[in-house]
Image (cartoon, rainbow, N blue to C red):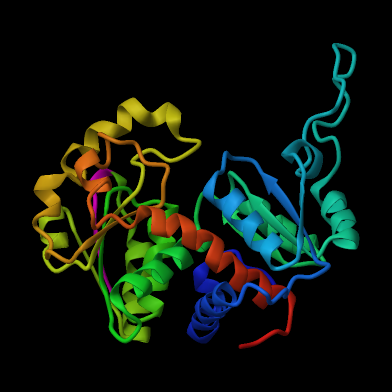
Amino acid sequence: MNHFLSIGDHPKELLQHILQQSAYLHKNPSIKTLDGRNILFCFEKPSLRTKVGTEVAINQLGGHVIHISPEAFLGGKVMYPNESSNDLPEERESLKDTVKNVSEWCDAIFARVYKHQTLQTLTKYSGIPVVNALCDKYHPMQALADLYTLKQKLGTDRSFVISFIGDANNVAYSLIELALILGHEIWFSGPSEYYWNTQQLSYFSHLAVEYGGAFFHTLNPTEAVGEADAIYTDAFVSMGEEHTYQEKIEYFSDFQVNEELFVQAPDHAGFLHCLPAHRGVEVTDAVIDHPNSWVYDQARNRMVVAKGVFTTLLTEYSL
């Protein structure tokens, strides 16, 4: 595994190994698989769980984290522009040069970016592994934490039924990929105005057939949760899309995960949310604070799965 940009880039066996490795390392905190390793963190977007959880994981494994600003690493604008500097380049330094420099010092790059294209450029020139901390298309670290949480709550010897209610976004995409590759059943329900395109739906169906999972989608959220082991939602308006809030939010009024919807699922069903949550928008207090809410378990497990990902990327350590 050279890089970790999306779930679909990797075979089922490797993804299963990461989850197993994560569990083992978390239960055996004395193992220092990243002793002497240096990981560069660069975040264009705000982050709590991804940044803190992963940094704690690397520290516990004996590694070190170096934080750098996007302006310094991802190009940035010229340092001191003025009216007479119209002929200066917009970038302070090319991304090709910065990533080649960092590759001489560090062992991996952990980057949260606005555009997936930025990650692709990093991998093109990087001499060290690049890990996706979130981009506009994918959130693979979150998906791993989600499935790890479901295994903890529901057991490892059965398949799950997962219902995602809301926006067809990066979190939902990676979750659907991983759930199907691991052979689970997943439902999606959201407004038609913010739905998967034909190519995406075809891809999900292909994964279901190839790996023995099942994918269903519907415009009716009640239909989607009837057999759910877990109901999942995310913010209706993602980071970087705040300017679209007023025009977008009206389409999601029927897709809030509230008490009325939650009771349509089996009594054992849990609630999942990648956080941050907008209480009273995509989920009500009664659901996110329900005894069957697993959102803080998910947050803890962001740290756990980071151990498996970076150990698998950077070492030959095996269970």
The relative height of residue 4 versus residue 11 in the rendered view (above or below) is: above
Query: Does the magenta-highlighted stretch encompass residue 187?
Result: yes
Question: In what quadrant of the picture does the C terminus appear?
Answer: bottom right
Give the percent coordinates (x, y) of residue 123: 72, 63
Q: In this image, 238 relative to 168: left or right?
A: right
Q: Most extreme residue toward the front, as rendered? A: 30
Give the percent coordinates (x, y) of residue 223: 11, 60
Q: In this image, 82 relative to 300: left or right?
A: right
Q: Nearer the viewer, residue 315 or 135?
A: 315
Choose top left, top right, bottom left or bottom right for residue 14.
bottom right
Q: Nearer the viewer, residue 172 or 67?
A: 67
Give the percent coordinates (x, y) of residue 179: 36, 72
The relative height of residue 80 versus residue 315 in the rendered view (above or below) is: above
Q: Residue at x 86, y 14 (%)?
A: 82
Taking the image as drawn, is residue 240 in sight?
yes
Choose top left, top right, bottom left or bottom right for residue 44.
top right
Q: Most extreme residue toward the top, as rendered? A: 83
Question: In what quadrant of the picture does the N terminus appear?
Answer: bottom right
Q: Residue at x 81, y 35 (%)?
A: 91
Taking the image as drawn, is residue 220 in sight?
no
Q: In this image, 180 relative to 61: left or right?
A: left
Give the percent coordinates (x, y) of residue 168: 34, 52
Q: Nearer the viewer, residue 263 or 198?
A: 263
Question: How many numbered discs, if any?
Answer: 0
Q: Residue at x 56, y 52 (%)?
A: 50
Q: Tell me which segment is drawn in magenta.
A: 184-193
Query: Does the magenta-highlighted stretch encompass residue 123?
Result: no
Choose top left, top right, bottom left or bottom right for residue 100.
bottom right
